[in-house]
Amino acid sequence: MMILRTTPEMRGQSRTWHRAGESVGFVPTMGFLHEGHLSLVRIAKERCDRVVLSIFVNPTQFGPNEDLAAYPRDFARDEALCRTAGVDAVFYPEVATMYAPDHSTWVVEEALTGVLCGASRPGHFRGVTTVVSKLFHIVEPDVAVFGRKDAQQALVIERMVRDLDFAVEIVVAPLVREADGLAMSSRNKYLSADERQRALSISRGLRQAVALYERGERVGAALCGAVAGEIAAAAGRIDYVELVARADLRPVAQVEGPVLLAVAARFGATRLIDNVFLG
């Protein structure tokens, strides 16, 4: 497995593989890998001859009061996991590699980023779309795999790729959970034992909403209320619990087609997100 640190190294290796007739799959991450990330690697390996995983804690997607400095990092552990998973190359750039000191160009999606996480984290998605577009230009993948836990992010990236004609296929992989139901996230490391137990209210509430839906409930207030009630009972601080259309993330009052029931809540200082698709 190669560890590539610069743009010329990464782009050159990808082009070498392409000249040899090999396809390149790509899994962009911020590191501190877990089984959710490794499931994306397995999908990329099934679809492509070579797999690149990037590790870059992107400063432009963090707000001024967010956890950039504290975000968990353990490259030695990540490297070992990548070797075991059969990753061909890890792209591990420095901030100075990704952003010039006078960087002033941004990629902005305007239809899908003003709601949910975009409303509560201003500027977040501008950082995401900019860094992902840069990574696509550097890695030049045929396929890129994203996880459905970040459902809004995946929809935004799909729209960006469509609108800007990137020559990359986007695959959105299933959400992966811990055995107790908590959605896998690098930020789970922040949770105390008590906070982690209380955070299970998110997935418990989502399961209740799914059960209501399967029994015929279609009213958004009832579905969202089932989730919000569980989180509130566990003393979680709700950022949002919203029912939105799957295609364009517009709020909907009831399920009449494919929808996303999306959640963001805090336990202690840790902000967690989760979701289910209905309809």
Image (cartoon, rainbow, N blue to C red):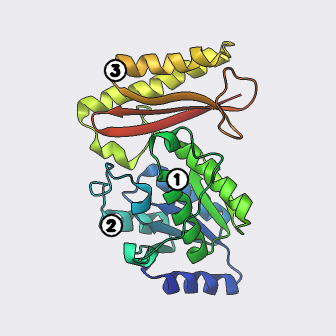
- How far apart in space, not on screen, are marks 1 and 2 (Cα)? 25 Å
Residue at figure coordinates x 31%, y 28% from the top left? 197
- How far apart in space, not on screen, are marks 2 and 3 (Cα)? 34 Å
Residue closer to the observer: 121 or 143? 121
The x and y percentages for residue 231 are 40, 22
N-terminal-most mark, 1 or 3: 1
N-terminal-most mark, 1 or 2: 2
Q: For the residue marked with disc 3, what is the amino acid?
A: Ala
Residue at figure coordinates x 73%, y 59% from the top left? 162
* Numbered circle sitting on residue 125: 1
Residue under label 3, please give it.
Answer: 234
The x and y percentages for residue 243 are 60, 28
Is 221 positioned to the left or the right of 71 in the image?
Answer: right
**Between marks 2 and 3 in the image, the one whose residue lies nearer the viewer:** 3
**Between marks 1 and 3 in the image, the one whose residue lies nearer the viewer:** 1
The x and y percentages for residue 146 are 57, 54
Q: For the residue marked with disc 1, what is the amino acid?
A: Phe
Q: Quadrant of the C terminus?
A: top right
Residue under label 2, please give it.
Answer: 75
Inspect this view and state whether residue 94 appears. no
- How far apart in space, not on screen, are marks 1 and 3 (Cα)? 29 Å
Residue at figure coordinates x 59%, y 67% from the top left? 133
Inspect this view and state whether residue 8 appears. yes
Figure check: 204 above or below 110: above
Q: Quadrant of residue 60?
A: bottom left
Q: For the residue marked with disc 2, what is the amino acid?
A: Phe
Residue at figure coordinates x 51%, y 86% from the top left? 8
* Numbered circle sitting on residue 32: none
Figure check: 273 above or below 6: above
